[in-house]
Amino acid sequence: MPTTAGPSLAERLHAVLDSVADAAREASRDAASITTIVVTKFHPASMVRELHDLGMRDFGESRHQEAQPKVAELGALDATWHFVGQLQSKKARQVATYVDAIHSMDRDSLVTALAGPVLDSDSLDVRALDVFIQVNLTDDPRRGGVSPGGILPLAERVDGASGLRLRGLMAVAPLDRDARASFAEMRELSVGLMQRVPAANELSIGMSGDFREAILEGATHLRIGTAITGNRPAPG
Ligand SMILES: *Cc1c(COP(=O)(O)O)cnc(C)c1O
């Protein structure tokens, strides 16, 4: 019998979901208004299946070459797939055939690549793609995301593109700054966006280390990896 085993997947998941519920209560928010996406990158399809058995329905991936076969293997699963990583324009249409949402929209060329009908890889139905504009809160242009000043022009492009549904904003909190302050900035940027596109009222903020702060600032989508999955194996 293993004596050094850490908490199980189910235990980690329930600890996170309890903390999400606690933070929602602290923020006087309904926990049901917050979607917890489990970021399963570098983990096998079998873990997604286990998480699905535990009741989870939203999963996040960040690399096309890993995500495509994983989603295909799990084709029959009733799940919503979120693409959260940086996306090459030339891969974008392929990614759009198997994901439901892209959280990393950050440039015009991606809008051009994704606009127009994309057929679902299974059903061959035309699918509407949910889009979050990623905001770069650092001064480092190599990070994914548009600068805050670039949000509204890009939002208008997405909003005017057929097949794309602008849902809101996404960000990764910079490490060198208080996460709560970053998320407060995102909340303000979201208010500005909603004045232009009222339906784009969602906020994809909060990861393993900062989801409480994100919930307090209005997160509607949390992207949580390691706190649920445990440490990621080395990328394959
Ligand atoms: C990997 C990843 C996450 C999850 O990170 P954790 O710290 O493991 O929770 C969230 N968002 C993005 C964009 C990621 O690439």
Image: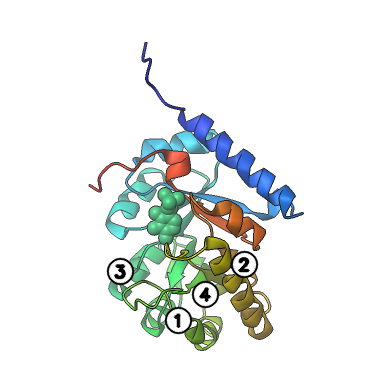
Placement of 52 over or under 179, stated as above or below: above
Tag in front: 2 or 4? 2
Q: Residue furthest top?
A: 1
Q: Quadrant of the N terminus?
A: top left
- Compare residues 94 and 181 and report the one nearer the observer: 181
Image side of residue 33 versus residue 145, left or right: right
Is disc 3 in contact with disc 2, using a CB cutoff of under 8 Å? no
Distance from the alpha carbon under mark 2 to that under mark 4:
15 Å
Q: Which residue is found at the position 51% from the left and 31% from the top? A: 10
* Helix, strand or loop status at disc 1: loop
Q: Residue furthest right?
A: 28
Provide residue 205's location: percent of width, then percent of height. 54, 61
Residue that carries the numbered disc 1 in the rendered image: 147
- How crowded is the residue under tag 3: few (<14 C-alpha within 10 Å), some, or many (20+)? some
* Helix, strand or loop status at disc 4: strand
Residue that carries the numbered disc 4 in the rendered image: 164
Residue that carries the numbered disc 2 in the rendered image: 202
Image side of residue 115 versus residue 193, left or right: left
Provide residue 73's location: percent of width, then percent of height. 36, 44
Q: Quadrant of ligand 1?
A: bottom left
Residue type indicated by callout 1: Ser
Total label count?
Answer: 4
